[in-house]
Image (cartoon, grey):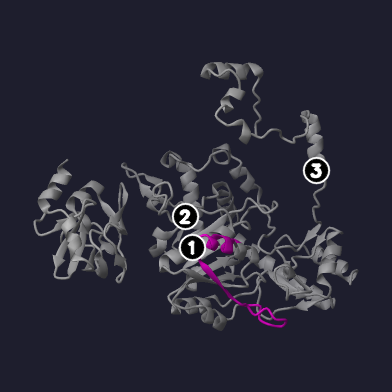
Amino acid sequence: MFPDDLRYSKEHEWVRVDGDGATIGITSFAADELGDIVFVEVPEVGAQLSQYGSFGVVESVKAVSDLYAPISGTVTEVNGALAEQPELLNTDPYGAGWIARVTMADAAELEQLLDSGAYAELTSG
Amino acid sequence: MTYTPHTDADREQMLATIGVGSVEDLFADIPPTVRASRFALPDPLTEQEVRAELSRLADRNRIPRVSFLGAGAYRHLVPAVVGEVIGRSEFATSYTPYQPEVSQGTLQSIYEFQSLICELTGMEVATASHYDGATATAEAALMACRLTRRERIAVSTAVDPQVRRVLATYCAGPGIEIVDVPADLADGGTGLTPVDAASRALDDTVACLVAQQPNFFGGIEPMADLADAAHAEGAKLVAVVEPTSLAILAPPGSYGADLVAAEGQPLGIPLSFGGPYVGLMAARMDAVRQMPGRLVGATRDAQGRRGYVLTLQAREQHIRREKAASNICTNQALCALAATTYLTAVGPEGLREVAELSMIQARHTAQALEEAGLGRRRFAAPYFAEVAMQVPNAAARHAALAAHGIVAGHLPERDYPDLRDTLLLAATELTRDADIDGLVAALRATR
């Protein structure tokens, strides 16, 4: 139900690791809970993220929520398409709906994140 | 407002209903040590006595026969329809709607207000209003800081000193630094904000340039050039404007203003010891999520009918308190309705006539003083409806005239020590030729 190649935070963000870099997004569970997403405030390139710190905002027709960084790092790229198409978080949360790419500060932080099985368990309750 | 007294029987019934022995028992939770032991209040009076006392106090008001006072607040004709509309109980007694969608009439009036402010300023989105022009300006400056993620602002010294003091107050909390841009206020100078001075104050740490059009001295600022100077450093231009002037001057949207703030008082709100007034704020749509306060949007309901809603509320304090665009603002719905009614009543042509007559009478005033050898214009630049005149012994003569019911404008030396012997004279469509003659005669009689 959740991709096996990703790591997940309890705040419902996912991380895809690629060497020192990582891509961050929100899970399909989070997107479904939020409903139709109408606005995503992404961080600036160069911003320093700290694990579990707030790095952006996602706004849906029924709620507004902070985005919490699943890992620490420096933002190298943000998904500019979200400005015009925030609904990508609903339609393709693990693909075109990615939010930011970072250079990880400490890969050991990944150990604190959940695998797909543990995350599925977290969200099934 | 209706006064509804409670009888002793009413009180006893209420106390019995809630099971409390006495009114004093209601305050049992407040320790005696923190209660006021006594109130220094006069003895109760009869209604007749209260009326007499209030009349006595009211008689102490000095209502000037003739006034050339402006400096941020302007005496204009308020058509009777304004009082009629805002006096309707549906509007006069309702506070900001907390179940807003059932208050379609209130929301529609706010939507129309926003639409009129957008039309007037040439901007894309306007808020449902603010306390007054000064707080709207301060909110605009804070908004520029959020948009640019910078923490310094540059402010022309030709911006209303009271507005600049409110800016300083708002900036003190978050630690935003204010950089003054010195206007050319020398005798015979332009009286304007030099573009090169603005450029010197601006760099990539400055969020915005705040400039006023017309400026505090009535001068017509080079707003397009100031906008370019701000934009060259990635800063925003906050244009502080006078709304009736927009019937004649270029709208801020046309010269590159990113944010517009204004005191809305000239639009149908009487002068009354400084308030209540209404602040106007407008911006471009790409900045809407950083706007403070209420926004009303138009939409369609499930049956396709036009309706009005509060929109983009995620910016607001009742949704996200700690991350709201502002926790220190509210709208002024009744005064905004007065402005809406005023603008609707006078229309574009009427507003233009108001602005033109104000300009004409300001020129007659300046000319009359010059021809009588009483004073001369201090600044060289074109002006709108307020003019700084160099008049010998201005402060003493200002005081002498006030004693005779003539307010000879504003004394800028209160805020600008270098501007001694200067009178800042404002005219509006209510300024009569006889008022100008009266000012000249009274100034002649003093020295």
Measured along the vertical axis of the image, is residue A109 above or below residue B391? above
User: Please, which chain is the residue tagged with disc 3 on?
Assistant: B
Asked if disc 2 and disc 3 are in contact, CB closer than 8 Å, the reply is no
Q: Quadrant of the C terminus of chain B?
A: bottom right
Measured along the vertical axis of the image, is residue B14 above or below residue B148? above
Residue A19 image position (x, y, % from top left): 14, 70
> Does A23 lie within the magenta span?
no
**Mark drawn on residue B326:** 2
Relative side of B17 to B401, left or right? left
Residue segment shown in magenta: B166-192
Q: Is residue B16 visible?
A: yes
Asked if disc 2 and disc 1 are in contact, CB closer than 8 Å, the reply is yes
Residue A40 image position (x, y, % from top left): 29, 59
Dot 2 amino acid type: Ser
Mark 1 vs mark 3: in front: 1
**Mark drawn on residue B316:** none
User: For the residue carrying disc 1, how many other residues have a C-alpha within 10 Å: few (<14), some (14-19), or many (20+)?
Assistant: many
Q: Earlier in the sequence, mark 2 or mark 3?
A: 3
**Mark drawn on residue B142:** 1
Q: CA distance from mark 1 to mark 3?
A: 41 Å
Q: CA distance from mark 2 to mark 1?
A: 9 Å
Q: Which residue is mark 3?
A: B57
Q: Which SS class for mark 1?
A: helix
